Amino acid sequence: MIKTFKYRLYPTKSQAAVIDTTVTNCRFLYNCMLDQRINAYKAGKSVNKIEQLNELPAIKAEFPEYNHIFSQVLQNVGIRLDNAYQNFFRRVKQGEKAGFPRFKGGNQYDSFTYPQAGFKLIGNRLELSKIGSVKVKLHRPADGKIKTCSITRKNGQYYACFSCEVEAKVLPATDKEVGIDVGVAAFVITSNGEFFPKLDKYRKAEKRLKYLQRQVSRRMKGSKRRRKAVVLLAKQHEKVANQRKDIAHKVSTKLIFENDLIAHEDLQVKNMVKNHHLAKSISDSAWSMLFQFLDYKAESAGRQVVTVPPYQTSQICSNPACGKIVAKKLSERWHNCPHCGRSIQRDVNAAINILALATIKQAG
């Protein structure tokens, strides 16, 4: 399996300038290749990936600045465009929203890739062809065999992303199963009665974000002060996103390590955020991110993730001998069954039902 490891880079000023120039030139090449394909199509012809890659030596001869970029990095630009076309045709064939490849603006193209060679990790330094030896912070080891290295920049910071081929590490069986219910009052509630606190990183940072947004609005468009304000706002948004991602990683890892099977509702989060009263809280809760992390971690750990329909999981009594529907408003946070007398927290009741449905699904 392929796993990506991301590390912070600390280039010197001259190295950062080379990285920025490389990104800019790769973006310009991408746009030229896209323009060539569009014009060829309008003329009733076609240009494929191989033809465009074969033109790179002539491009380097005419534009000397491309001689300062590693050859495989330039080739990867053509492959990147071809992948965008292949994805476009695939979506058209499947009847999805197509999304034709677009020309990339200055803030829409922020990376380049060494697909096979041109990079080498030596201690805390990353040797990059045509750039030099860049300091890298290895906060954890990169497992497996490194296949590719992508250099990205975001909000004035630089990162190296290594795609590594690793062997799946199957965790020992625990003989435990758990159902989880997600919410806005608490992030995750398990069928065992465990509560993970709600994610409200955006709401906590909202005052600061509003202030920074006002600073951007008040600055003159195109000015240096506005660009600085935009960077500060983007960094604050990135900080909130990283905090949210960190908690989702910790919760998903704990669930995977402690259980052989994790069951959750098959929620359509995109439709749920259309509720204007809960949209901000739902988005801040990062349910989709949690489900995504559970899926890929379970695959590598030999665990099972089972999804079940969300219909009335919080309304049905979780007592196996009862199973009656007890209608409750969203504001009612406690399940009190008049039929069997069961009294339990509403979300725990839902989590138990989710696990029961997953068990039935597995047996069937």
Image (tube, rainbow, N blue to C red):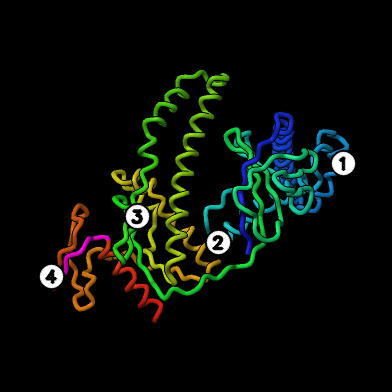
Provide the residue designation for mark 1: 58
Point out which mark residue 120 bears. Answer: none
Q: Nearer the viewer, residue 142 or 314?
A: 142
Between the C-alphas of marks 3 and 2, the distance is 39 Å
Provide the residue designation for mark 2: 94
- Residue 355 forms part of the magenta stretch: no
**Residue lying at the far left of the rendered structure:** 338
Contact between labelled residues 4 and 1, with CB atoms less than 8 Å apart: no
Q: Nearer the viewer, mark 1 or mark 4?
A: 4
Q: Position of residue 329 (x, y in %)?
A: 19, 56
Mark 1: which amino acid?
A: Ala
Provide the residue designation for mark 3: 196
Inspect this view and state whether residue 219 appears: yes
Q: Nearer the viewer, mark 3 or mark 2?
A: 3
Q: Earlier in the sequence, mark 3 or mark 2?
A: 2
- Left or right: 228 as drawn, with respect to 287: right
Picture residue at 63% right of the left edge, 47% below the top: 138
Q: Nearer the viewer, mark 3 or mark 4?
A: 3
Q: Earlier in the sequence, mark 2 or mark 1?
A: 1
Provide the residue designation for mark 4: 341
Q: Which quadrant is home to the N terminus?
A: bottom right
Q: Residues within 10 Å of mark 4 (few under 14, many from 20)?
A: few
Between the C-alphas of marks 1 and 3, the distance is 59 Å
Mark 2: which amino acid?
A: Gln
- Left or right: 83 as drawn, with respect to 335: right
Q: Secondary structure at mark 3?
A: strand
Query: Where are the magenta residues, as a range?
Result: 339-347
Q: Position of residue 48 (x, y in %)?
A: 76, 53
